[in-house]
Image: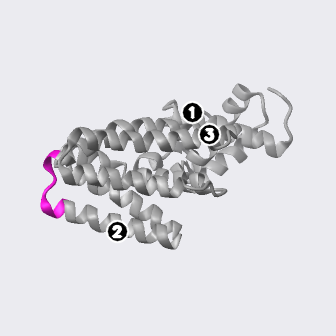
Amino acid sequence: MRKHSNANLVQHIVRDFEARLLGGQWKPGLRLPSERELAEQLSVSRGTVREALQRLAARGLLVSRQGSGVFVTDALQAGFISPWRQLMTAHPELRGDMLEFRRVLEGAAAYFAALRAEARDLAQLAEILQRLRDARAADARPAEAQADAQFHEAIAHASHNTMFHHLHNSVITLLREHIALNNAGLRAGSDAGVAECLLAQHESIHGAIAAGDADAARAAMWSHIDYVQAQLERRATGTPAD
């Protein structure tokens, strides 16, 4: 292992442990190897391992049980908000995985919403879209992110597919965190037109669903997700806007 300052070394070990949590090597309920065993595996001191474990425990990802050891919690499954937001911030590659997942789930949800949405579903979508417009006009970014997430949630409801609804609800907090992070990333700096493009994409999705055009609704959702991914990749690489 390369030499690091102590602070950097601890952070390096934290990232290693995070990768084990994310990759499923450390599953909820697992009792971790002892500090000595982990230190030997990583060729670092027990003190460095202890500090890394304490940082993860402070975030609710691990728990120490007196006389029993250190165990993995179910925080990534049961409590998405804080741990997932921190992990997505620290591991930007997760955003790409989430966008792939959202493209599949939300494209299908938009397709079936266009086929099955009832009058009350359409009224709810229209009301949320108006709140999104109002927030955009006022540059009220937290309200904009909230309305954005609610818009996508309402589409899942409007699909009238129990599995889409259940799956979306199972990860809704994570999806909201993802949308909020994406909005913050896309709005950092101030590329002219990005916010307007995002709003126009939501208008297109809503219009296709309201018109009952399933293919157009799915295509509009795909276009939206693809735009977000392209913009985030552009920012990550420092590529200038067209």
Instruction: Please tell me which residue lies in front, 201 or 140.
Output: 201
Q: Is residue 202 above or below residue 131?
A: above
Binning the other alpha carbons within 10 Å of mark 3 as few (below 14), some (14 to 19) or many (20 upward) gives some
Binning the other alpha carbons within 10 Å of mark 2 as few (below 14), some (14 to 19) or many (20 upward) gives some
Q: Residue at x 40, y 51 (%)?
A: 201
Instruction: Please tell me which residue lies in front, 195 or 43.
Output: 195
Q: Visible in this render: residue 27?
A: no
Q: Residue at x 13, y 57 (%)?
A: 118
Q: CA distance from mark 2 to mark 3?
A: 29 Å
Q: What residue would you read off at disc 3?
A: 234
Q: Secondary structure at mark 3?
A: helix
Q: Is residue 65 left or right of residue 106?
A: right
Image location of residue 54, percent across then percent down = 66, 50
Picture disc at residue 20 = 1
Image location of residue 177, percent across then percent down = 48, 54
Q: What residue would you read off at disc 2?
A: 130
Q: CA distance from mark 2 to mark 1?
A: 43 Å
Q: Is residue 56 left or right of residue 119?
A: right
Q: Residue at x 69, y 44 (%)?
A: 52
